Amino acid sequence: MTYVYNIAGLNISIDVPYEIKFMRRFEDFYVKNNKSQSDIYYNFIEVKERKKFKTLPIHRSTEFNIYYEDSIFYREFIYLNNKEPNTCLVDRGDNNYICYLYNKYVHEEVQYSNIFDSLALESAVIKQNVFILHSSFINYQGNAILFSGDSGVGKSTQANLWEKYKNVEVVNGDRAFIRKINNIWYAYGSPFSGSSKIYKNESYPITSIVMLKQAKENKIIRLDKKQAFRSIVRQVTVNRWNSDFYNNVIDLVDELTNDITVYLLECLPNEGAVNLLEEYIKGDLKNESKDNWASNSKLFIW
């Protein structure tokens, strides 16, 4: 059976040998009666035996191992506290992926709960110049404000404070997909929302990115280009074992920090932090509008 999902404006086709039970967080991203061509394809195939590799993994973690043989990346996933892998994703460098389902572990929990965890979407979307930023984000007057930082710093807390005091919409609580279209940077909601359980399929132009730091008082500064780059790249999902992936992320974040204002907000979880940030964002948007008017006026006079 074939299922198509739209994430970050990309159609992702998933072909599986059985029916997928819909997970709530993916429902808004499901494309019904899809007739357009997909951008990314996954073909899941059941196999009886685990793939045998000639080399050792180039990367190991508790969730997966990475092998690189004959210019192909293989990612074996380990689920459900098993000691051996359940699935193996084959990445040949294009937009067509094969995922082997090891027959020994194919059962309902793997089928329904972990099929999407085998996609490694960050490695697929980066080929479309899209990357994933660890952040919560809100819709503020039709624009995206993203809150980013290390786990536990208060990304969801700040987003929820804006919802409470400014009546904004929280689009996603943990992962935003970032993409530039026609010279405009957009943040896209995703099905990956951490513990927030907020996963809306919406996108908005990015007005600012806010790096968070817990503090005893509220204080804000605009980061310079170098500071902004270092802060953001640490929060991007990166496959460091893949040099093409890594270099593409570096280029995209470099371009992003040329275009978008990045703040460091040292803050308390209170209304004062919200008001302080809003004051700065409004001021910068006002100045940007003046600069654009002046630039257009000069062009008109010329």
Image: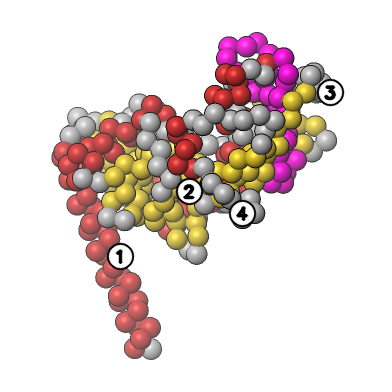
- Considering depth in this image, is 82 or 16 the residue closer to the camera? 16
Give the residue type at disc 3. Lys
The reply to whether residue 178 is in sight is: yes
Measure the alpha-carbon separation of dots 3 and 2.
37 Å
**Residue 271 drawn at (x, y percent):** 16, 38
Quickly name the residue at label 3.
54
Find residue 248 and name its label: none
Q: Nearer the viewer, mark 2 or mark 1?
A: 2
Residue 45 in the image: state x and y as whole percent. 74, 30
Proximity of marks 4 and 3: CB atoms separated by less than 8 Å:
no
- Kindly identify the amino acid type of the residue bearing the numbered disc 2: Ile
Nearer mark to the viewer, of 1 and 3? 3
Q: Kindly identify which numbered label has been placed on residue 178.
A: 2
Residue drawn at (17%, 34%) of the image? 270
Marks 1 and 3, how far apart at CA = 57 Å
Q: Earlier in the sequence, mark 1 or mark 3?
A: 3
Between 47 and 22, the one nearer to me in the picture: 22
Residues at marks 4 and 1, CA–CA distance in whole angstroms = 41 Å
Check if mark 1's residue and mark 3's residue have beta carbons within 8 Å.
Answer: no
